[in-house]
Image: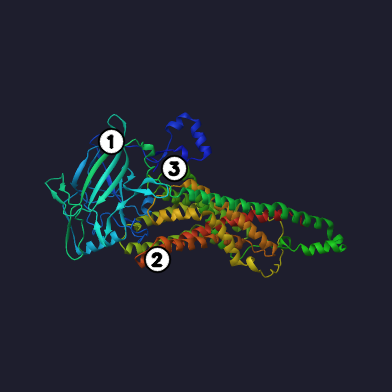
Amino acid sequence: MFGTMLPIRLDRLPAGLAFFVLTSSQLASAFYLPGITPTNYKIGDLVQLTVNHLTPSQSARDTHVRSVFSFDYYHHALHFCPPEGGPESVSESLGSILFGDRIQISPFKLHMNVNETCKAVCDEQIFEPRDAKFVNRRIWQNYNLNWLIDGLPAGQKYLDPNTNTEFYQPGFALGEVRSEQPRLHNHYNIYIDYHQVRKDQYRVVGILVEPESLGESRRVGEGDDFTAECGNPGVPQILDERSQTAVTWTYSVQWRSSATSFATRWDKYLHVYDPKIHWFSLINSAVIVMFLIGMVSTIMVRTLRKDIKRYNRLDQLGLDDLNGSDSLEDGVVEDSGWKLVHGDVFRPPKHSLALSVLVGNGAQLFMMAGFTIAFAVVGFLSPSNRGSLATVMILLYTFFGFIGGYVSSRVYKSFNGTKWKQLFVYTPSAVPALVFGIFFLLNLFVWARQSSGAVPFTTMLVIVGIWFVISVPLSIAGSWIGFKQPQAEAPVRTNQIPRQIPPAHGYLRSVPSMLLVGVLPFGAIFVELYFIMNSLWSSRIYYMFGFLFLSFGLLVVTSAAVTVMMIYFVLCAENYHWQWRAFASSGASALYVFAYSLLYWARMLKFSSFTGGLLYLGYSLLISFLWFVLSGTIGFFACWVFVHRIYGSLKID
């Protein structure tokens, strides 16, 4: 994973890190982070072309994605030519397997700087009517082929209409639809850009494939060196669904010298869509955050300070003076706010064990997300290292099980909990078991469709093994350490008899307050969420981790500020049940995330099967649940600090 190197681009680094790199002449000239080690080829050297799964995508004809299933390149109905000895898989990372990559070697023979014209891949292949129907359906659904050469994806050339920028989109079409007739692409014009680094030393810096549908192609000659006569472009290759169809797969190769260096070869693939929208979203979110911080600061600095001084002054005068002063007695009547619940505000909530488990898992998710984004921002998670992002996320979540156990134990101890054995078991098992169970159930539907996106059973066992061998012991160790530490004392005593809570009205009721609190954190990140959804469901590369880093920071600050403000209003209404309210209100942004996923489904996706919609709905619910746990934990701890600070400032005997 860390055996390859990726160069840093100074224009994509944070200002502080870029300054550090520039101040070191050695780093500025030859500083590489883990990614890809350059491979040098000589003229005539074999350049391996590997193939990946077929994936659904958008097209110029149809901007909707119509399927969620990917298929193995050597699926029996596709009849692609296998290499000698049969398909052979290339070793992949755990994250790559989870995201459906199935990389295998191919029979294509590409030699550095050696052009080829119309070569046959193998003997002609016979498509039965059933196979033809399967392939034509995939063409209607805009499926793409995915090839890799020297770690770079083979792509098609696109023009961004907003910026008139030309870039490469990974993958190229299996076929095309013209006049309501699907045509199979059976010929591939492969254009490979190379960069000469020294005499007789070349590097691959770009791959472009222009597929064609050429009927009447046929192989000529004998032996392993297949040649062919390519058909007429005016006669397309059409698969007949009523009788057998013979297809000859052919390709041509053209090598092109390029000034693009190895360090910048991914630039043509990593295209930023609508950068103005990104900046507008960030500026808009920053304005919202500044407004919220201003409101919270006003509450903290002015209102709370005024309240605390008044409460402390009344306490210092004593009960005798209080009984002899009508004005002070009137003042006490007016001060019917958050001070009156000081004897109940630290009362343990109902279902404290469940809340502690959720908060512990939320802290684990928060640490995992923060460190993953930080690693990606500084360049450790290169898109050339396939699956590295998902692999790092899984490993970080596993090792941060210690944090989850420690946090849940400390929170539970502050609630005066007694069911410690249940806490030790539920913290590392409840949320992961729920997530894994839903994932396994959805994976059964993928298996049933014979999709290559189905996670193999052995990979499932590996994930369970990692969880059981590493995450569970670390979580138990963290819970034990948290259990052994002394309990933090509350700043005020808790009364024996609970105070009666007056009925809530308007926005202070549970559901309205959750909807109000949740909309603002969602508003801070919804634009970035669109690009993440495109990456997940439209097979596009997501690499804008700088924007994601800023959006994550805005999410944290917004969730904390707006939840603190709502809890202040709740306490002023003499409702001391703030723990679950804080968690649920901040986590309510997950409702908007799920609603947005439904909107994305309606606008960008048109599944042609019930199973596709079921999978999308299931994964959207799963992501929304994890979002609820993560954002709810942020709001809970923000209110935890807030409540301890304001009640710690009171002078109460």
Q: Amino acid at mark 3?
A: Phe
Q: CA distance from mark 3 to mark 2?
A: 35 Å
Q: Is residue 600 left or right of residue 255?
A: right
Identify the secondary structure beneath mark 2: helix
x, y (%) of residue 133?
24, 63
Q: Is residue 420 left or right of residue 42?
A: right
Disc on res. 225: none
Q: Amino acid at mark 2?
A: Leu
Q: Mark 2 or mark 3, which is nearer the start of the sequence?
A: 3
Discs 3/1, front: 1
User: Which residue matches tag 2?
Assistant: 614
Q: Is residue 456 left or right of residue 569?
A: left
Q: Mark 2 or mark 1, which is nearer the start of the sequence?
A: 1
For this rendering, which residue is in front, 274 or 626? 274
Q: Which of the 4 image quadrants contains residue 580? A: bottom right
User: Which residue matches tag 1?
Assistant: 41
